[in-house]
Structures are given as structure tokens and as C-alpha cells.
Amino acid sequence: MLDESDNAGVKFGCHVIDRMISWIGQSIMLPTLSNMVQQMMGSNDWRFKFTAIMSLSQVGEYVKNVDDIAPIVKLVINFLSDPHPKIRFAACHVIGQVSDDCQPEFQNKFHQELVPVLLNKLSDNVPRVLSHVLAAITNFLEGLDKELIKGYLESILNTIFPFVQQGISLVRENALSAIAAAAESAREYYRPYFEKSVPIIYEIMKTHTQPEYKQLRGQCIECITLMGFSVGKELFMKCASDIIELMAQIQKNDVALDTLDPQRCYVLSGWQRICLILEDEFVPYLQLIIPPLFKVVEHILQAKKQVKEAEEEASLFSMAPEKKKPIELIREAGKKNNNTFEHEEAELAINMIYVFITELKKSYIEYVEPTVELVLRALTYPHSEKIRKQASKCMPALLTVIQDSNHPNKQELKIKLGQGFLDALWTAIITEFDPETILQMVRAIRDIIDLCGKFMKKDEIEETSVRILRVLRDSDQRKTENENYKKEGDVEAEELEVLNEDNDQEEDLHVGIAELIGILFKTHKELTLPLVNVLYTEVLTKVLQPGLSDKMHKFGLFLIDDMIEYLGIELIPNEWPHLSEALLKYATDKTCFVRQAALYGIGVLALKSKDAFAPLAETCLVKILEALKIPKGNESDRVYGFARDNAVSALGKIIQASGAKLNAEVIIPEWLSYLPMLYDYPEGRKQHELLVDIVLNWNAALVFGQNGERLPRVMKILTTIVDTKMSNESIERKISQIVRALLADEKTKALLENACKQLTDPQKKRLEKVMMKGMKQ
Amino acid sequence: MQKILSVKDITTDGVKQMAVQAIVSMMERIPKIFKDNPVLLKDFLEMTFAYMIETTEDVTPEWINPKEGIYI
């Protein structure tokens, strides 16, 4: 909200106060600050009051209960009517900053007081103050719930729209921001106002072509596309063509490449929004938009020669990082150096490309080639990890475009491009220093290999294995260095926190590497056996030691799960018993995600061991039932639910694998008592399909009970999953078959009718629906 | 640092800003010194406010009515 021209010294001081609260702690700082502010408020010198009010803007971030802000709100509302314009300005500043820091609680609590007061202050006769009232309104509206803004929308728009059309550019820009915030928060409630709003903004975009109105035009683009996002495709389509053509014209003729131009940023995010609104309807415009757009992106992604030096200079006076809006970035960029803005622009550019690829899917095929060049450039963008990460994500997404397209040589093209991407990613990983970015690159490699299937030869797999092991060893080395540094002593608490966070990221990277190795096993089977040998002899023994962290155990268990699932007992018979032992050991681990990984492994062990499973079955069952009895404790429903679902799934897989060899009369009712699975959808669908398959193809009495005593329970399970992600067409078709079969016999019909009486109304409706569907098939 | 900040004739505000910056960096490195010494903390907060007050500019016509396209 506050820019350099408003007062650099005050801005700097506010940052210092913010850092003091952050480092010293609010319990010490807030009373000290409050005493001093009260003293300064009593001064006759307006500068004391101004500074004191400005300092209050830093408090919101640290207030735990929004009720504690009530005295500040009361105070600043009074200052909104102060005779001195800078005091009124400061009061607006506090409201804007606290709105941002404490949303949505602040808005929920104070909307009745603040919305009318702020709208009333739009009568201020000082343009600078007026623009700051609008900025405060923008921040307030951004955090206001759509149900709350609904009642104010008419008066907000009636009061603010006149400021869009007249006055100095700063006021008009901030009025546009406020309208955009209102449209964004109101979502579908903005529909009645959309068609009236668009011509006003469109006219400004079209007519204000002078250089001093670049910011204004940019904000018009933002406002109009945010409105479109809120009102949806159908309504936006009515004016989409005119808006897109005008934006394309601005992009082609008015967006400067070699100088700072705020329009660039707005055009990039504008196209991204339009793509999300229009989806496939956006495709016809791509020919018009993409060639000039890619020129802009290419320019943005060019590394600036002086960036590094300028960054070093800037860091001397760096302040605590904060979340910035495009308008602030643009303004700051205009004042001092352009680096942050350029990085932000580059981030917007690569995000926009990612949205285009993933939203337009196969329709994007024509643009894959030019996009590849941009993505490869972004992968080596030196000044922002975010850009390198997003570029990595674009790569498998581009391969998916090719895979889903009608390109005549799509298989060869996919593999050729995939190989090129893999080379680029492995090269980038060598010079990458940020573990989170390395993890994203490893994930991209995993997805590329998964998409391409078996395409590497023996020597390429060996090379890939060497690279994987190097990433693993480098990560281990960084972890060890961090640990050693921690032991050296004299490490501050904050530094310790950073080192622990770093190591946590390294462990996430380990898990990511395990997932990549899993995909190699899946796609290249026997070619990976030399890698298995290294992992088995050097890695697993180390990471599964009891004293290591949960994430390292998860890493080891992931490797085991994938060895069992994708290589099978035929390829690794000697390792099999030891792998099974490790799974059993961790199946009852106290940590949900470790337990989940081990239980999943037991499930695949049952399916993949063939005859070798029989001697293990009893021990596995005991462990699974033990795991199911572990209480939830403080774990979240979701985390606990996933572990529980994997235990249930393992039980089902043992039933599936053991068939008649198992004491099914006991185990199946036990398994049923834990169904349906509600968290792990893919595993859930497998188990629910197994349930209907046992009824249809194996032995219905095992499921329903000899006298149908479990039929009510089964019907509850089936009618709970119908029409949800826990089911699919195949399961529902089989449910319909089961019900029809039960209805065909008088005895079972009576049992079914009795079971259905115990269903809730929504469950009965779902059953009717599935039967209707079944009749049609 | 206090001396630097109290001198009235240092017109280059960068020097005073650097003084405040130096102290806040020290505070971030060793917050305990300030946590354990309320007087020192109060003095530093006062210095920060003094700097803010001193650099607060009067209302000018340019501030009231910024020129068109001020941020471009």
C-alpha cells in the first residue's frame, strides 16, 4: 500500500518495527510499542501522530485475536476525519494493512463499521488521500466473504465507478483495483453488474493510449479479466472476442519489450485468466495471441546481465520479505531497481505457459515446439527457483499434450522430446543448490519416464542409476554437513530451525527419489537389477535403522513397496524374505505415514508372492489387525484415514491372494467391518470392486452371511460409495447386477427389502439411481 | 549509533538509515540482548521513531496531487 514516494523513511521505520516485533516477540514488544504510541498521540506536532499511526499498521500480523484490534479500529476511524491530510492518509494505511494481515477475521468482525465509513470517505478532497481510501477499500474487499459483500455490492459499485472515469490516474487506478477486488470477492454475485461494467472499462483500455496511462490500461486488463473469472464462461463469452482482440492489439503494438512496462505483467496474468475461463473456446484465439506473446516471454526470460550485481547492492539495504501485489511491485520497480519486478514477470510468464499447457491439453499441440524452447530457457533461469521449478513441471505436461494429440508420430515425438527433457533436467540438477527445486526436477524426471514407458537401453538405465545415486549421495552429504554444523555449538535457535528445515527438505527429496526409482522399476523391470543390488546392499540397510527419522523410514519402505510391486518375486527372489521382514516390522509403526507405506507393501506382497505368501499370511494378518487397532491420537482424520485405508486394503489383498486357503469365514466379516474406505480413493475402488466380485463370482454367502445377516451392512457400504470417488462405472454396474439377482429370488428379495429399510434417504436415492443406470445398460 | 541519529546536520538520510539498519541486524543476530534489557529496547524503538519523524515530509502540492502516470 505504501510506496517510496509516500515517505521512504517512514516505510523503512515501519519495516524495522515489524522486524522488532518478529524477533523480540509480541509479548515484550506490543506493550512497549503501545506505551510509546500513546505518548506520541498526545503531541501537538502532526508528524508524531502520523508516525505513531503508521506504526500501528505493523501490529495486525501479530495479533492473535481480532477482537484485540477493536481499540485500534476505533482510533483510526476517528483519524479518518482529521483535518491534516497525512493523518487521514495514515489512518487509511492502517485499515488497509490490517485488512491484509488479518483477513478474513478482520473483515468478518468489522465490515458493518468499516464499509460505510470508507465509502463515505471517498468524498475526501485531497486526491492522494482519496487514492489511499480506495487502496484501503481494495484490501478490505479482498478478504470479504462473498455472502457478506453481496449486500454492499450495489452501493460499492455505484460509489466507486465514477472514480474510474474521472480524476488523476492514481485515483482511477486505485478505483479499478477496488472494483476488481469487489468482483473477485463477489464471484457469481457480480453477474448482474458485469454487462454494465465491461463497456466502461473497455472504453478506457481502448482510448487511453498515452504512455502515462500504461498502468491504468494494465489495471483495466486485470479488472475485466477478474470480473470474467467471477461471472463465468457463459457471460464472459458475450464480450470475450472484443476484449481478446483489444488485449492482443495492446500486446502487439503497445507493450514495450526493452523498457519497464507495467502492461506486460497484466497481459500475462490476463491471458492466464482468460484461458482458465474459456478453456477450449480460447483455442481459436491462440494464433492471434501466441506469436507476439512468446516474444514477450522470450524477452522476459532472458537473464539480465547486471541482475546479480544489482541484487547484491540491493541486499545491503534489504528488508524483511513480504507478499507483494503486482501494483506494489511495479511501483517499487519503477523507483529503485527492476529485478524483483523482472523475476515476478518471469514467474508470471512461466505460470501462464503452464496454465496454457494443462488447460488446453491436446489443443496445444501446435505450440509445443516453440514452448519447448521457452521452457528450456526457464529451466536455467538463474535468479529464481520458482521459475526453474515451474519449468520442470511444464515438461511432463508438454509430453501429455503430445500423448493425447492426434499427431501422426506422437510416440516417437514423445520419446525424443522426453529424452531431451531428461538430459536438460539431469544437467540442471548438477548445478542446482535448492533441495526443493531438485525435488521438483526429480518429480519431472519421474513423470517423463512414466509417460514414455520402456524407452531406455541398458547403458542408459545404468547412466540414469548413477545419476540417481549421485543425487541421493549429494543430498546425504548436505544433510551430514548440516548435522555437523549443528554439533559445532554456538548455533542460534533460529539458525537451528533453518538447518532442521533444510534437512527436512532433504528427506522429502529422498522420498521423491524413491518415487522416481519406483517408476524405473515399473517401466524398465529387469534392466534395473544392478540398481536394486546397490539399493539393497548399501541404502536399505542404512535407512531402515530404528534410530533414523520417520521420513527416512518412509523412503526405505517406498523403495521396498516398488521393488515388490514392479519387479516381483521372479526378479528378486533372494531379497524377498528380507523385504517382507522390513514391511512387517514397520506395519505397526506409531507414525501414520510410515505405517501406511508398510501396510501398502504388505498388500502388494500378498498379491505378488504367489505360493511364497502362504507361510507369511498368518503373521501379516496379525500385524494388519494390530495396525487397525492403533488409536487416532492427535493425528488428523485424513492422515490417520490413509493409514487405516491401507491396512484395510492389505487385508482385502490377502483375501484376494489367498482365496480358499484362508479362513475366509472369519477374515471377510472382519474386512467388511472396516469398509467402505473413505480416504485413499484408488485403493478404495480396488477394494470395493473386490467386494462386489466376491459376491458375484466367488461366494456371496461369505459376504452376506449364511442367513443374510450381513446384507444390511453390505448394502450400507455399497450405497455409501455409489456416485462418489470411491466407486466407478464398473463397480456400479456390478452393484446393479447383485441387486437384480437378490430381487429375483423371493427369499433374498425379502432380506434385501429388510436391509434397505435401514438405509438413509440419500442412500436409498443412490440405490435407485444405480438401478436406473443398470436398467439402461 | 545514538549519536549518529541525534546529530541534526546529517542531511544524507542514508547514514542514519544505515545506523538503524545496523542495530536491527544486531538485534536479529542476538535478540537476547534486547529481550533482557527493556531500556535498550525502548531506546532503540525511540530512535526508530525519531528517525521516522525526522524524515516525515511536509505536505506538498506534488504529494496532494500526483502527476499523471506517477509510477511509470
Image (cartoon, coloured by chain):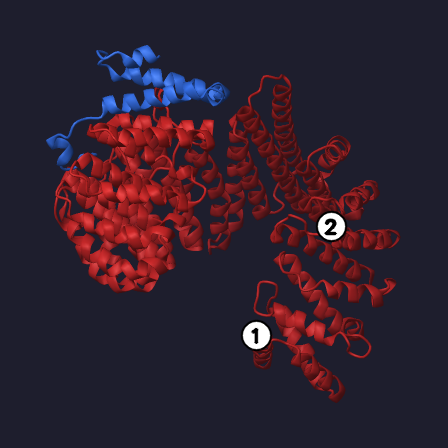
Chain colours: A red, B blue
Q: Amino acid at mark 2?
A: Leu
Quarter of the view holding residue A269: top left
User: Residue A158, percent across and down?
Assistant: 19, 58
Work out whether residue A155 or residue A330 is closer to the camera in this orientation and state it: A155
Quarter of the view holding residue A684: bottom right
Horizontally, residue A374 falls left or right of residue A122, namely right
Same chain check for tags 2 and 1:
yes
The disc, 2 or 1, on the residue closer to the chain's N-terminal end is 2
In this rendering, the answer to whether A175 lies above or below B58 is below
Q: Residue furthest left?
A: B61
**Dot 2: what SS?**
helix
Horizontally, residue A125 falls left or right of residue A59, namely left
- The residue at the point 33 percent across, 49 percent down is A142
Pointer 1 local density, CA inside 10 Å: few below 14, some 14–19, many at least 20? few
User: Which mark, residue A762?
Assistant: 1
- The residue at the point 48 percent across, 37 percent down is A389
Work out whether residue A386 or residue A627 is closer to the camera in this orientation and state it: A627
Question: Which of the chains bears the disc numbered 2?
Answer: A
Q: Which residue is mark 2?
A: A599
